[in-house]
Image (spheres, rainbow, N blue to C red):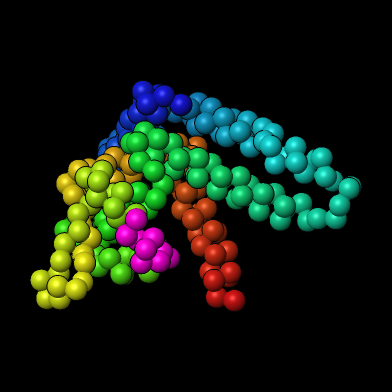
């Protein structure tokens, strides 16, 4: 997908979000458009609901060949496929900004601290599950690219802190913007009520798994 097309979709999503926040006046105007628009919207959603996706074809292909619960298979397989699309969106975000996955991952950990986007090297290595040697090699690469800098801690000269540079923070912010575009494209078919309902259902599922 080209940058122009993706940015165009992002502007569309932003425009819709702005419209949703415009207040009761605009909501009243939309209501006054008449039942015809409502009927058209309902018909559009019905067409989407009846359309066949890859999971429908997957279930049809396996029905009668292996025992499985169809609703469970439909939910889990769609979650798996959507997760793959999320992963592809992240890859696209990195491609747009010229970052490698390990660079973004390290910068993301630093950015999560807030300004000045700094953390002890040992703490960062523990979060990233890296050995001291692995952390040193990664920081060497990032520092050569001008994305981070290493500083001796004032209170303890043996401790090395890692800090995002201004350029590093700019590149991370741009990657996050592209990730946001990809995520907005995925959820764009759902209205606000549907998004809230889906979030609640997924939370219930996740809580069940996390509290076992």
**Most foreground residue, 131 or 108:** 131
Look at 26% across and 55% down and name the residue there: 111
Q: What residue occupies the far left of the structure in this picture?
A: 154
Q: Nearer the viewer, residue 198 or 178?
A: 178
Residue 198 in the image: state x and y as whole percent.
Answer: 52, 53
Image vertical order of residue 129 relative to residue 27, above or below: below
Res 96 → quadrant? top left
Looking at the picture, does residue 48 appear above or below residue 115? above
Q: Let me know if residue 114 appears in the view.
A: no
Looking at the rendering, the stretch of residues picked out in magenta corresponds to: 128-137
Image location (x, y in percent) of residue 136: 32, 60
Report the predominant secondary structure element of the magenta stretch: helix
Residue at (32% x, 65% y) in the render = 124
Q: Is residue 39 magenta?
A: no
Relative horizontal placement of residue 209, taking residue 36 as reference (left or right): right
Residue 170 appears at what percent x and percent y?
22, 43
The image position of residue 37, as x and y in percent, is 48, 27
Above or below for 163 versus 87 = below
On screen, residue 161 versus residue 6, left or right, reads left
Looking at the rendering, in which quadrant would you find the C terminus? bottom right
For the point 41% across and 24% down, the residue is 2
Q: Residue at point 33% right, 36% down?
A: 97
For this orientation, the residue located farthest to the right is: 64
Let me know if residue 161 appears in the view: yes
Q: Is residue 132 magenta?
A: yes
């Amino acid at each position: 997908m080209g940058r122009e097309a993706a940015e165009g979709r992002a502007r569309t999503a932003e425009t819709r979000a702005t419209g949703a926040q415009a207040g009761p006046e605009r909501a009243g105007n939309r209501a006054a458009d008449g039942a015809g628009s409502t009927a058209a919207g309902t018909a559009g959603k019905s067409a989407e609901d009846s359309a066949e996706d890859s999971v429908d074809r997957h279930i049809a292909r396996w029905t009668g060949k292996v025992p499985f619960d169809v609703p469970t298979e439909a939910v889990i397989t769609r979650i798996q496929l959507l997760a793959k699309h999320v992963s592809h969106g992240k890859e696209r975000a990195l491609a747009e900004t010229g970052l490698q996955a390990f660079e973004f991952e390290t910068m993301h950990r630093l950015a999560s601290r807030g300004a000045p986007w700094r953390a002890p090297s040992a703490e960062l290595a523990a979060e990233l599950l890296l050995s001291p040697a692995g952390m040193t090699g990664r920081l060497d690469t990032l520092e050569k690219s001008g994305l981070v800098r290493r500083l001796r801690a004032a209170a303890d000269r043996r401790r090395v802190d890692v800090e995002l540079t201004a350029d590093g923070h700019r590149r991370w912010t741009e990657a996050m913007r592209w990730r946001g575009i990809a995520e907005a494209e995925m959820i764009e078919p759902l209205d606000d009520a549907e998004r809230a309902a889906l979030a609640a259902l997924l939370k219930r599922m996740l809580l069940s798994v996390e509290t076992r």
